[in-house]
Amino acid sequence: MTIRRRLATSLTIMTTADRYLSTRGDASSADFSDALLRGIAPDGGLYMPQAWPSLSEAVQGTTDYRAIGRAVLAPFIGGTLPAAALDAALDHLAGGFDDALVTPLVELEPGLFVLELFRGPTAAFKDLAMQLVGSLTDAALAASGERLTILTATSGDTGAAAVNAFAGKERVRLVVLHPLDRVSPVQRKQMTTTQADNVLNLAVRGDFDDCQRLVKALLAHEDLRAQGRLSSVNSINWA
C-alpha cells in the first residue's frame, strides 16, 4: 500500500461519525458504546462526534420517525451495537407515544405550525431522547455483560423521563436527585411513585444547581468510578 493510500485510509478511519472525542482534547477517542456508557470523558470533557455525515434528500422528505431516526443515528453508532438494536430502540420509542407520527406537526392556523413534543409517556420533551438512551444503553450493557449506575440531577423533566425509560432495566441502577419542594406535583409523583427496584429518588434540600454539583462531584470521584461504571443522562454528558 502506498504512503498516500495509507494516509487516506487513516484519515477516513479517524474522521468517522462513530468515533467520539472529548471537548477538552486530553482523552483517547471512544466508540459509540463507550461514549454512551461513560457519559463524561476521562478528562472531564463532553463527548462529541469526530464527523457529521449529511442526510440524503430521500430521508429529508419522509415523515416516518423510525426511518429518520435510523438514517440520523446509524452513522453515529457504527458497528458497536448489534444491527437490530437501533431498530428495536426506535420501535420501543414510537410504541410509547400516543401519535403515530411521534412528533406531529400541527397547523394551528394558516401559516402557523407547532411541533408537538409532549406525546410521550411522561408528556415531557425529554422522552424523545430518554426512551432511545434507555434502550440503547440496555443493548450496550447486554453486549458487554456490564452493569451501570446512572446519576442524574433534575428539576422535573429529565428525572421523570429517566425513571420511565430505565425502570426495570436489570443492568442499570438509576439515582435521581431533585430539589425538595421545587418540582411540579405531577413530575414529583412520576419520579417517586415508581415501583421499580432499580430506581432510587433523592430529594435534596437546595436548588437544581445543588443537585447538579452533587452529581458532578460523584462522577468525578475516582474511588466510586473504580467500583463500577458511573454515567449520567442529562446535559452534562454529550456535546
Image (tube, rainbow, N blue to C red):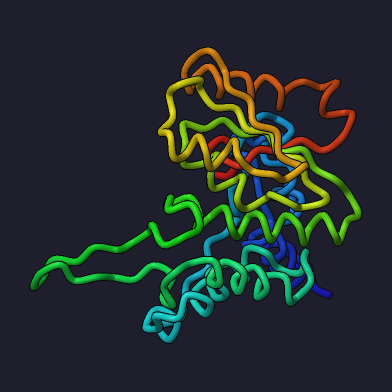
Q: Is residue 102 left or right of residue 214?
A: left
Q: Residue at x 39, y 78 (%)?
A: 60
Is 20 situated above or below 23? below
Say whether residue 105 is left or right of residue 111: right
Q: Locate residue 121 relative to residue 173 in the image: left or right.
A: left
1 on left or right of 60: right
Estimate the x, y position of residue 213 in percent, counting from the top left: 58, 19
Residue at the left extreme of this rendering: 110
- Quadrant position of the N terminus in the picture: bottom right
Residue at figure coordinates x 69%, y 49% from the top left: 167
Count the numbered circles shown.
0
Q: Position of residue 205 (x, y in %)?
A: 54, 13
Residue furthest bottom as drawn? 58
What is the residue that sits farthest to the top in this orientation? 205
Q: Residue at x 58, y 22 (%)?
A: 203
Question: Which residue is nearer to you in this view: 160 or 38?
Answer: 160
| Picture quadrant of residue 238 | top right
| Residue 215 image position (x, y, % from top left) | 64, 25
Q: Nearer the viewer, residue 149 or 81?
A: 149
In the image, 122 versus 44, the foreground residue is: 122
Expressed as whole percent of the image width and height from the top left, the position of residue 51 reads 57, 59
Q: Is residue 138 above or below residue 95?
A: above
Residue visible at 43% across and 34% down? 185
